[in-house]
Image (cartoon, grey):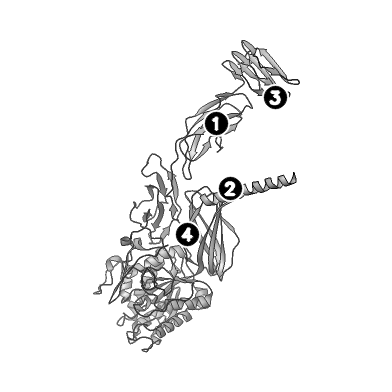
Amino acid sequence: MMHTRIKIRKHLSLLGVLFIASLKTFCQIAISHPVERMIFQRNNSNQAPINIAGTYYAAIDRIDARVLAQLGGTTTDWTTIQTNPSNGYFYGTLTATGGWYSLEVRVYKDNILIDTKTIQKVGVGEVFVIAGQSNAQGGAGVSTPAADDRVNSVNYSNDFSDNNKLPIGFSQLGSTPTSNGDSTKIGPFHYVPWAWGRLGDLLVAKLGVPILFYGAGHGGTSSENWSKSAQGLPYYSEDGWKIQDLGAPYRALENSLAYYGSLTGLRGVLWHQGESDPLTYMQPYYQNIKNVINKTRENTEHNALAWIVARVSRNPEPHDGPIFGQNALISGYNNDPNYPPISNVFAGLNTDNINGSANRTDGIHFDTYAGQIEFAKAWNASLDNTFFTNSTPMMASPLLAVTLSCNPSNTANPISLNVASGYSKYEWSNRQNTNSESLGISNNSFSSFTNFPLAGYENLNWRTLDSVSTINVSAARIAANVRKSSKKVLFSPVIDLTTFTLPTNPSFTASALQVRPNQNLTLTGASCNGSYVWSTGASVNPLTFAPAATATYTVQCKTLHCISPVSSPQSIIVSSCFPSSLSLNGSVSAAESAYASKQSIQSNQIIQLSGKIDYNAQTKVELLPGFETNSGAVFKAFILGCD
């Protein structure tokens, strides 16, 4: 006997394992945020909230997450980031310290583990936007890419600065040729690593946290070009690579700050510009760059956005005007109240001092390995502890909330999605860009380079759907972004609704239209393609229960995201007094409520030992052949009728 019990327990245990395994096989989630290699800007306490969002494909009621330290950082405990998600997606945050991690997310239903998903690489560290001209952007030829896996960028470049083309994805800032081109880009604008990979390696070694660069430098641009394009004003230029109609050169900086920076946060702007201002005096240079600084702080809604301004003028000889202007931005000019220091502008390197043909073959550009190494070392030295202690980073923005409702009357577009009103611009995506739509083109003085977003990047098309706060769509993978009047962009999670299903309209039958008190009633639903939701709150089918009083019942059909209209109602009377004659059979094995009829009762029931029942009829009680009462049973019959 003991042996048999053990076998039964093993059998039950196996069934439980199979049940859980089946749930994990068919009830999955997908993480849409963060994407692989995304790095979140840390605060000055070495922490950052990581935005975590995704889609669920079956009912779940709890989402837990943790990060596992890979290089630096601290592994966290499992933390519940959301319960009872709705609207087709889950979203929560997990705070982590500076480091390089894998992220694990697991989901539950009724405390049963449903699924686990992992993002292999995600970071909390330092995020910088590079801006300026050619020594910021870089050029074809020599580059010093990063060796450390923790130095990353957006591997995409496009001179047209069209945000519809901008992918959301990140790659190691390395040198390995890829299908995206001959080297890793620093999106959204730089088509080569230049010296920034080397700087990234130095910063990782010094700080012990991952580094992310955005590239917004634009070769051959003057301080006036930057100032006027930031203000949306035209400027004179015979250079065809400055596409003013698309906001060049400022637009790439705006996209880096207001578009990408919203997703990851950022520490500040690394500004390296001045070679195209040899004849610019201090005063106009100061005002031009002050205009740009003000616009970046407006676009980010971060008045303390840090700028690290390099001292730059060599073309190929040094010039005083831009140097004096740069110094005035940092520390003011001779206590002149018209040229005070700009708050949160920090002293960068002085690259005029890095000279000679070993560093710059043309006297202007750092187009040698030796020059780029010195350039990176000087930048690294200027990004010192004083800077990190006194600058105030901009943290990643929360993700935009989306509300989902169902519109079964619109069979072509049955999904209604809504985001908050009051924004300047709305964009929705229901597909990826085609190759022609996502083609990136970069140019220098001699060549043109083309590239596409890498596989695994989010390459969302924002131009197909209406630019409104509420849209009706068919089943698809959906995302939204909104633009504030400041130009800052907020993004929703990507919600995978490709398996969206409208519920059918259910019906049901009742085992009886009248039951006695404490007698069971069975309601049986039909024609539902999801789960049944009864007006009692129950969700089983069929539903068996003893109604307490006369009531009306309905049923609805629920799919993952929608619930049908209520069915036609059925009223069930709870009373021992039946208006018509009764014909009774079966067995009575316990005390039951009486049967009463306004007409007659016929019965061939068997009243068992513990049974107890009364019959009460208006005209007659007839005990048919087969009727039986066992010893100890209690049976009474009356000719009284009922009301």
* Disc 2 target residue: 19
Report the Cα–Cα distance between label 3 and label 2: 40 Å
At 25% from the left and 74% from the top, the residue drawn is 237
| Element at label 3 | loop
Seen in the picture, residue 491 relative to 578 is either above or below; the reply is below
Residues at circles 3 and 2 in contact by the CB criterion of under 8 Å: no
Q: Residues within 10 Å of mark 4 (few under 14, many from 20)?
A: some
Three-letter residue code for mark 3: Ala
Residue furthest to the top = 619
Using the rendered image of the protein, determine whether residue 270 is visible from the camera's viewpoint.
yes
* Closer to viewer: mark 1 or mark 4: 1
Q: Tag on residue 33?
A: 4
Instruction: Provide the secondary structure element on which disc 4 rests.
Output: strand
Q: Mark 3 sits on what residue?
A: 591
* Apparent side of residue 290 relative to residue 52 in the rendered image (left or right): left
Find residue 628 and report its horizontal and vertical position in percent.
Answer: 69, 18
Seen at 41% across and 53% down, the residue is 477
Q: Secondary structure at mark 1?
A: strand
Query: Which numbered dot is residue 523?
Result: 1
Q: Residues within 10 Å of mark 1 (few under 14, many from 20)?
A: some
Distance Cα–Cα, label 1 vs label 4: 44 Å
Q: From this viewpoint, which residue is outermost toward the left?
A: 238
The front one of 301 and 139 is: 139
Residue 313 position in % (x across, y down):
35, 83
